[in-house]
Image (tube, rainbow, N blue to C red):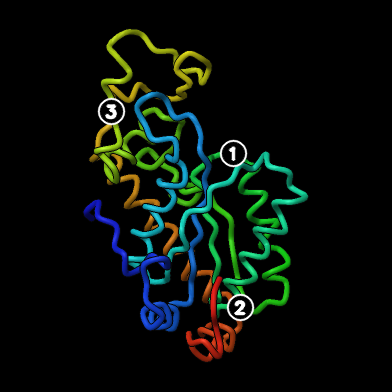
């Protein structure tokens, strides 16, 4: 696995014919979630969504399906307003013809997973589609696949996907507190000692594979007549936007 992210599985880069072909082969859509948040002085603020998006692109490259662009939102936004918006997104993806919708959050708090699953609930209620809300390592969690906050794991992921956006020198050489509190706001193992692109690569491989296998499982769980792309075609008379 290399770090390049194929544009052929990312919905925003696909032409209509490419989207339809991919959806007919494997009618699964992956939606990455994250937010703009402090991740130490050495990592990009969009780390969570970038991480989830990269893993899902690697998953789609191997298993099929397409990846929706990263959704940046905070689970603490007013849920009364946020939940209908996310549900509407999932409804529109369902109407686009997908049979499985997997929402994956790189922001590892329960609130965001609860939001994704609550938004999916009315969408999957009729049994014609299946869905799941996951953290990126929910299914791959192990000694080689884990998460933290701007420490070993998240730094390694960014070193693999976006090395030019990581600047370890910003952390200096002095002592750092790893309890999530100021002044460093980092939680986990010291990335200066434990992070590497190789660690990130292995984490991504395991996470992407586990999510891909879950996608197959969800598709197979549907009644046989509900497992195929359900839209007549990706063309103006049948589809316009999502």
- Measured in 3D between alpha carbons, the distance from the residue under mark 2 to the one under mark 3, in whole angstroms, is 42 Å
- Measured in 3D between alpha carbons, the distance from the residue under mark 1 to the one under mark 3, in whole angstroms, is 26 Å
Q: Residues within 10 Å of mark 1 (few under 14, many from 20)?
A: few
* Residue at numbered disc 3: 167
- Measured in 3D between alpha carbons, the distance from the residue under mark 1 to the one under mark 2, in whole angstroms, is 29 Å
Q: Position of residue 3 (x, y in %)?
A: 25, 51
48 vs 5, left or right, is right
Which of the two discs, 1 and 3, labels the residue nearer the N terminus? 1
In the rendered view, would you say 195 is above or below 10?
above
Q: Position of residue 23 (x, y in %)?
A: 44, 79
* Residue at numbered disc 2: 95
Q: Secondary structure at mark 1?
A: loop
Q: Secondary structure at mark 2?
A: helix
The answer to whether marks 2 and 3 mark residues whose Cβ atoms lie closer than 8 Å is no
Number of numbered discs overlaid on the protein picture: 3
* Residue at numbered disc 1: 109
In the rendered view, would you say 184 is above or below 218?
above
Q: Secondary structure at mark 3?
A: loop
In the rendered view, would you say 218 is above or below 138?
below
Quadrant where the N terminus is found in the figure? bottom left
Q: Indicate which label's residue lies in the foreground, 1 or 3.
A: 3
Q: Residues within 10 Å of mark 3 (few under 14, many from 20)?
A: some
């Amino acid at each position: 696995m290399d770090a390049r992210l194929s544009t052929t599985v990312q919905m925003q880069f696909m032409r209509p014919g490419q989207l339809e072909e991919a959806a007919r082969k494997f009618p699964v859509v992956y939606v990455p979630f994250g937010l703009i948040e402090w991740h130490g002085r050495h990592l990009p603020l969009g780390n969570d969504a970038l991480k989830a998006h990269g893993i899902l692109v690697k998953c789609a490259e191997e298993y099929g399906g397409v990846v929706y662009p990263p959704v940046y939102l905070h689970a603490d936004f007013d849920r009364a307003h946020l939940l209908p918006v996310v549900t509407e997104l999932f409804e529109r993806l369902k109407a686009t013809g997908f049979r499985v919708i997997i929402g994956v959050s790189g922001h590892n708090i329960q609130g965001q997973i609860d939001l994704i699953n609550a938004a999916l609930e009315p969408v999957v209620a009729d049994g014609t589609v299946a869905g799941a809300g996951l953290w990126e390592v929910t299914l791959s969690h192990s000694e080689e696949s884990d998460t933290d906050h701007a420490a070993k794991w998240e730094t390694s992921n960014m070193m693999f996907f976006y090395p030019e956006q990581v600047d370890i020198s910003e952390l200096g050489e002095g002592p750092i507190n790893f309890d999530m509190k100021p002044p460093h706001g980092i939680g986990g193992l010291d990335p200066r000692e434990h992070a590497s692109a190789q660690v990130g690569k292995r984490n991504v491989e395991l996470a992407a594979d586990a999510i891909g296998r879950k996608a197959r499982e969800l598709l197979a769980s549907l009644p046989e007549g509900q497992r195929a792309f359900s839209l007549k075609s990706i063309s103006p008379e049948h589809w316009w936007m999502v």
